Every structure is written in structure tokens, then in C-alpha cells.
């Protein structure tokens, strides 16, 4: 973010970016719903591990790793932004955090399309939760620019 840009404009940019990344998560569920409507059901009669438990465990582990990595890297960028007084680093942290949070959703989409896995929505929910946790806070931006103002 260029120096001299008002905090409110920078924060609005962060909010718009965050909403766009959140909507991409919702789009994944809508995509599966439109292409494979038979997978979107309220029935829990299907076995959770399906007939491919190893694949489910590997994908679950991968999704959790990316979820936690998104939170760690996002917070590291915010700390660095405050330390270095670099507001652009707050935006970078937001984008990295949300992008890594998107990986579990992509894994859910892969499970839905490649393996007809009926609980794909749990992975998408984890991705949405990750993006929600990366909600931009104005306080972080203020702290990263307090010497500039």
C-alpha cells in the first residue's frame, strides 16, 4: 500500500479483498451443488471414511496442515508489518492466509469430483472458517502505520 494513503481507504481495500476471497469459498460449494447435486444430501448414512480411508486421512491431514499454516503465516506477516511499520505487509498476510485457507476447500472439491465423497462440505467449511479467522482488523493496520500518521 502506498505511503500517504488514508487508513480508511487501506482498510476498505482489505475488507473488499477479504469478502472476495470468502465468496470464492462459497462458490466452491455452489459449484459442487450444481455439477453433482446427488452429493449434497442431509443423510448421514454414508460411512465417514467411505471406501477409501487412506485417501480421506491423507486429505484430512493435508487440509489441517494448510489451515494451521494459513493462520501462522498470516499472524507472522501482521507482526512483521507492525515491527517494520509496513502496512503492505498486512495485506500480504491477509492474502496469504486466505489463499492457504482455500486449500482445504479445494481438497473438498477434489474429494467431491474425483471420489464422490459425500462429506466434502466439511473441507469447504474448514476453508471458510480459515478465511473467517483471517478477517482484517483495523487495529493491525493502525499499529502498522502509527509512525506514519
Image (cartoon, rainbow, N blue to C red):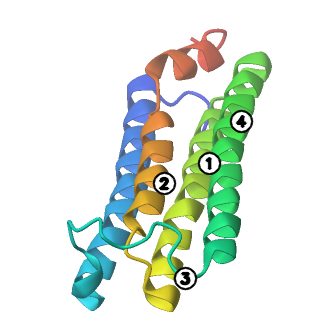
* Element marked by disc 1: helix
Which residue position is annotated with label 1? Answer: 67
Query: Residue 101, position in %: x, y?
Result: 56, 53
Q: Nearer the viewer, mark 3 or mark 1?
A: 3
Question: Reading the chain from its start, which is encountered first: label 4 or label 3?
Answer: 3
The reply to whether the C-beta atoms of the residues labelled 1 and 2 are less than 8 Å apart is: yes
Up the image or down, 71 lies above or below 116; here it is above
> Which of the two residues, 76 or 40, is positioned nearer the viewer here?
40
Up the image or down, 146 lies above or below 19; here it is above
The span from disc 1 to disc 4 (Cα, nearest Å) is 9 Å
Which residue position is annotated with label 4? Answer: 72
Question: Reading the chain from its start, which is encountered first: label 2 or label 4?
Answer: 4
The reply to whether the C-beta atoms of the residues labelled 2 and 4 are less than 8 Å apart is: no
* Element marked by disc 3: loop
> Which of the two residues, 30 or 146, is positioned nearer the viewer here?
30
Question: Reading the chain from its start, which is encountered first: label 1 or label 4?
Answer: 1
Query: Residue 85, position in %: x, y?
Result: 72, 20
Q: Residues within 10 Å of mark 3 (few under 14, many from 20)?
A: few
Q: Residue at x 54, y 23 (%)?
A: 141
In which quadrant of the rendered image does the N terminus lie?
top right
Up the image or down, 37 lies above or below 104; here it is below
> Which of the two residues, 120 or 132, is positioned nearer the viewer here?
120
Q: Which mark is residue 114?
A: none
Which residue position is annotated with label 3? Answer: 51
The span from disc 4 to disc 3 (Cα, nearest Å) is 33 Å
Question: Reading the chain from its start, which is encountered first: label 2 or label 3?
Answer: 3
Which residue position is annotated with label 2? Answer: 127
Q: Nearer the viewer, mark 2 or mark 3?
A: 3
Position of residue 11 in the picture relative to residue 83 (left or right): left
Position of residue 56 in the picture relative to residue 116 (left or right): right
Question: Reading the chain from its start, which is encountered first: label 3 or label 1?
Answer: 3
Amino acid at each position: 500500500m502506498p505511503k500517504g494513503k488514508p487508513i480508511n481507504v487501506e482498510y476498505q481495500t482489505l475488507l473488499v479483498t477479504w469478502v472476495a476471497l470468502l465468496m470464492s469459498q462459497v462458490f466452491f460449494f455452489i459449484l459442487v451443488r450444481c455439477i453433482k447435486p446427488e452429493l449434497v444430501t442431509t443423510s448421514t448414512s454414508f460411512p465417514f471414511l467411505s471406501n477409501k480411508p487412506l485417501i480421506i486421512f491423507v486429505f484430512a491431514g493435508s487440509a489441517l496442515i494448510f489451515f494451521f499454516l494459513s493462520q501462522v503465516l498470516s499472524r507472522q506477516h501482521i507482526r512483521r508489518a507492525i515491527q517494520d511499520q509496513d502496512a503492505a505487509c498486512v495485506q500480504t498476510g491477509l492474502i496469504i492466509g486466505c489463499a492457504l485457507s482455500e486449500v482445504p476447500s479445494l481438497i473438498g472439491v477434489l474429494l467431491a469430483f474425483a471420489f464422490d465423497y459425500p462429506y466434502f462440505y466439511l473441507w469447504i467449511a474448514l476453508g471458510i472458517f480459515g478465511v473467517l479467522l483471517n478477517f482484517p482488523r483495523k487495529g493491525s493496520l493502525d499499529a502498522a502505520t502509527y509512525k506514519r500518521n
